[in-house]
Image (tube, coloured by chain):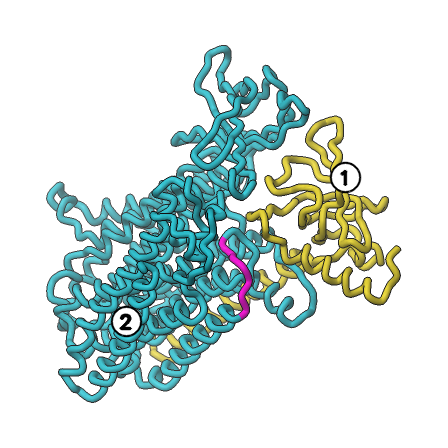
Chain colours: A cyan, B yellow
């Protein structure tokens, strides 16, 4: 009964989405206030029904209703309850429903926080979001209903993929989806502006906090995905340039370009057409990510059974969104007027450079990700693009961007003088270069990449410090800094921390595969690791073999690690559970390979020393906090009606 | 600066960026494409020498052997028509097993031994890597016209 209520709720949500997608848009075009007024109630109604549908699915999972195919293939009666809840987004169908739910959440957020916006704008934005929702809800109902039944019901479920039974998985997909879908808001604002033909500073100001919040969530989602891969896949990697990772990284890069070009659009009224294009691109890449991951064209942990019908539907939907929005852009963009002028050495030009490099990175990643798919689709054979390609392309593209990131925030809008900026930054530059050149001397091996990475990281951090020093002359000023200022510099500092972490872990990590008998010792990074043998135990839905490794320094025991091997009862899948000892400056990471003798006393053991790896997540976290702070800046909260340019000029002079 | 001048310089910057990026991309792309070959194609000598390529198929039953060092494993990849001996040093993915699908990247030695530097993990017990599935399918197609050996 409950699953049928879920289906019914989905159908009602779809009907409301159709209403929300058509009437307000039409009303806004005609200036019909009654039709425009439909937008908000329809959005809230749609949210209610999608939520009901989602709760029905949660209920089916929690009550082990194995007559529901989706539950039977993704759950198991002995699965711990919170994994049953997370299993709702572990499958193709469930994750699409979850996507729709998050879209509905963003929609009501827009409906709620847009009271001060002109009715026409809100109607158009909600209308466009309604249309996107129509696309996803009909995909759910036509090809991917999570509520399909089977008779007779399965006696037992076939368990959730063991890799997804990790608490990193509880938060990674929701955060990633919040990011993906959040860019739908920026997309909707862009389309609304194109429809109305009015692209002004007000438009940029309205969409900027939404884009920034979406970007913050996406940052968190990508970082959590990487953290999960590091802990759960058992071989200590945190980024593989896997197509699925790229699928989330491309919208992140485009979104990064977007939030920066929105800054120019808001403050200076320039780059407007370009910004709109980026908003369209970012959301299109989010859709592409969904398509790549959910259609089964990629082989990875995220890909489920290949279903050409679904793939074709998502591809068709994407073509409509991308093609439609680009056509609209081509039709409307020529009407837009150019914004304020600026010189080649100004904050605008720095942000332009950021955009060029971000977009070039997107293009490079896109090529490496899609080329194998095209070749395969054309029947020209199977090939893959190795991670070295991405590294070779990405590092040179991002290096100048990181350098300019230090200069840009300190430059004036419109134009700045070169000697002046050099004078302000000469100490930062000198200290950064000294750091890059000297710091690796204290490390194991002097590596050019370490010089570059640490130097750039120090450079960004130092320029943030310069920015604060120039801005803050008194204690009161420090506490009265606008949140946008804090946000931007915190996020930049976060990237500096992340770059330092990446540089350290890539250049100075140690890895050893060793054969260990009970009592055998291995040396790594100044530690002695002693293998104490294994013992067996039972988990709720698995049997495990757990090894004990004593880590000591000299003769003093420091801590113990317990790497394990799990065999899941239902599926028979084997999972390596790595044991990690995290600390601010390095991780020790041990995972069990396989037993090398029949008695199980000798094991292949993999040992890793990962210096500064936690700086990666720490840096990402700072970026997220920075993004959220910037988006909560006071100027977005007070009446956001279109203001006099003088106001924008005033805040531009403050440099945020 | 004049507006036309500004536009020109913008376009110049953008073009320079794009040109540089394109060069980088094509250079790196060329040298990092990993092509896939089935055991039959390797047998026919289609696979490159001294270049990393990818091979896929099933791990032949009874072929997995551990070397005395404990960390080197030799196994045979088959597409049911032809076989290719392979060796890998390191810890194999959890789902590596005899009779199951496998995909490996590596180089072919002059002695015909495939030295894998990466054995790809499957993430799901029932999931067959597309490359492995393709190799089997090709072999099946070929088997219709060829006599089994």
Q: Look at the image and tell me whether residue B55 can be seen.
A: yes
* Quarter occupied by residue B44: bottom right
Residue found at x 80% / y 52%: B49
Q: Secondary structure at mark 2?
A: helix
- Which span is picked out in magenta? A302-308
Residue B62: give its label. 1
Quick check: do tags 2 and 1 share a chain?
A: no
Residue A12: give its label. 2
* Quarter occupied by residue A68: bottom left
Label 1: few (<14), some (14–19) or many (≥20) C-alpha neighbours in 10 Å: few
Q: Position of residue B64 (x, y in %)?
A: 74, 38
Asked whether, in this view, residue A192 is left or right of residue A651, the answer is: right
Q: Chain of mark 1?
A: B
* Rendered view: A314 above or below A146: below
Give the residue furthest to the front: A152
Residue found at x 55% / y 22%: A534
Label 2: few (<14), some (14–19) or many (≥20) C-alpha neighbours in 10 Å: some
Residue A72: give its label. none
């Amino acid at each position: 009964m409950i699953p049928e209520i879920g289906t019914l709720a989905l159908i009602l949500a779809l009907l409301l989405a159709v209403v929300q997608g058509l009437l307000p848009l039409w009303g806004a075009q005609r200036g019909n206030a009654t039709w425009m007024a439909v937008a908000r109630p329809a959005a809230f109604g749609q949210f209610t029904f999608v939520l009901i549908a989602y709760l029905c699915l949660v209920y089916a999972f929690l009550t082990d209703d194995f007559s529901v195919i989706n539950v039977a293939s993704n759950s198991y009666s002995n699965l711990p309850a919170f994994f049953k809840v997370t299993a709702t987004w572990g499958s193709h169908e469930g994750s699409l429903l979850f996507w729709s739910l998050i879209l509905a959440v963003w929609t009501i957020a827009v409906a709620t926080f847009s009271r001060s916006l002109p009715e026409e704008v809100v109607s158009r934005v909600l209308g466009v979001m309604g249309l996107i929702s129509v696309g996803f809800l009909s995909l759910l109902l036509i090809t991917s209903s999570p509520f399909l039944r089977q008779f007779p019901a399965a006696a037992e479920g076939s368990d959730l993929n063991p890799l997804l039974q990790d608490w990193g998985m509880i938060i990674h997909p929701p955060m990633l989806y919040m990011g993906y879908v959040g860019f739908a808001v920026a997309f909707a604002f862009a389309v609304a502006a194109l429809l109305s033909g009015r692209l002004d500073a007000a438009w940029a100001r309205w969409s900027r906090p939404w884009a920034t919040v979406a970007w913050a969530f996406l940052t968190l989602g990508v970082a959590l995905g990487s953290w999960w891969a590091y802990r759960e896949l058992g071989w200590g990697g945190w980024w593989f340039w896997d197509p699925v990772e790229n699928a989330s990284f491309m919208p992140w890069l485009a979104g990064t370009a977007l939030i920066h070009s929105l800054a120019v659009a808001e403050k200076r009224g320039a780059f407007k057409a370009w910004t709109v294009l980026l908003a369209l691109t970012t959301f299109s890449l989010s859709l592409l990510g969904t398509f790549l991951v959910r259609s089964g064209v990629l082989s990875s942990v995220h890909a489920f059974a290949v279903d050409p019908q679904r793939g074709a539907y998502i591809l068709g939907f994407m073509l409509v969104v991308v093609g439609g929005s680009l056509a609209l852009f081509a039709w409307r963009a020529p009407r837009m007027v150019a914004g304020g002028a600026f010189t080649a050495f100004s904050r605008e030009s720095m942000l332009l450079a950021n955009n060029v490099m971000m977009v070039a990175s997107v293009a490079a990643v896109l090529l490496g990700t899609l080329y194998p798919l095209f070749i395969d689709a054309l029947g020209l054979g199977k090939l893959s693009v190795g991670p070295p390609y991405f590294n070779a392309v990405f590092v040179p593209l991002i290096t100048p961007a990181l350098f300019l990131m230090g200069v840009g925030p300190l430059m004036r809008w419109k134009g700045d003088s070169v000697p002046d900026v050099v004078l302000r930054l000469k100490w930062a530059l000198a200290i950064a270069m000294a750091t890059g050149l000297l710091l690796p001397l204290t490390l194991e091996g002097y590596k050019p990449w370490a010089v570059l990475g640490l130097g750039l990281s120090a450079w960004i951090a130092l320029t943030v410090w310069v920015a604060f020093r120039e801005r803050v002359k008194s204690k009161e000023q420090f506490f009265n800094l606008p949140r946008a200022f804090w946000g931007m510099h915190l996020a930049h500092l976060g990237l500096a921390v992340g770059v330092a972490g990446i540089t350290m872990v890539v250049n100075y990590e140690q890895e050893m595969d060793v054969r260990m008998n009970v009592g055998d010792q291995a040396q790594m990074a100044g530690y002695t690791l002693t293998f104490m043998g294994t013992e067996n135990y039972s988990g709720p839905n698995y049997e495990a073999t757990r090894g004990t490794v004593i880590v000591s320094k000299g003769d003093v025991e420091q801590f113990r690690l317990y790497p394990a091997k799990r065999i899941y009862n239902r599926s028979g899948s084997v999972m390596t559970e790595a044991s990690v000892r995290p600390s601010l400056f390095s991780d020790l990471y041990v995972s069990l390979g396989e037993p090398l003798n029949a008695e199980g006393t000798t094991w292949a053991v993999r040992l890793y020393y990962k210096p500064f790896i936690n700086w990666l997540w720490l840096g990402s976290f700072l970026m997220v906090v920075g993004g959220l702070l910037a988006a909560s800046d006071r100027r977005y909260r007070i009446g956001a009606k279109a203001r006099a340019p003088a106001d924008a000029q005033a805040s531009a002079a403050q440099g945020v | 600066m004049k507006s036309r001048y500004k536009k020109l310089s913008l376009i110049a910057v953008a073009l320079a960026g794009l040109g540089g990026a394109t060069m980088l991309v094509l250079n790196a792309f060329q040298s990092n494409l990993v092509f896939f070959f089935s055991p039959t194609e390797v047998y026919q000598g289609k696979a490159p020498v001294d270049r990393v390529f990818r091979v896929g198929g099933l791990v032949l039953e009874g072929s997995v052997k551990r070397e005395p060092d404990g960390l080197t494993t030799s196994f045979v990849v088959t597409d049911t028509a032809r076989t290719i001996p392979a060796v890998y040093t390191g810890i194999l993915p959890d789902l590596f097993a005899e009779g199951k699908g496998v995909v490996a990247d590596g180089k072919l030695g002059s002695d015909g031994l495939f030295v894998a530097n990466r054995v790809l993990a499957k993430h799901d017990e029932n999931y067959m890597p597309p490359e492995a599935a393709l190799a089997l399918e090709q072999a099946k197609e070929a088997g219709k016209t060829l006599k089994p050996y």
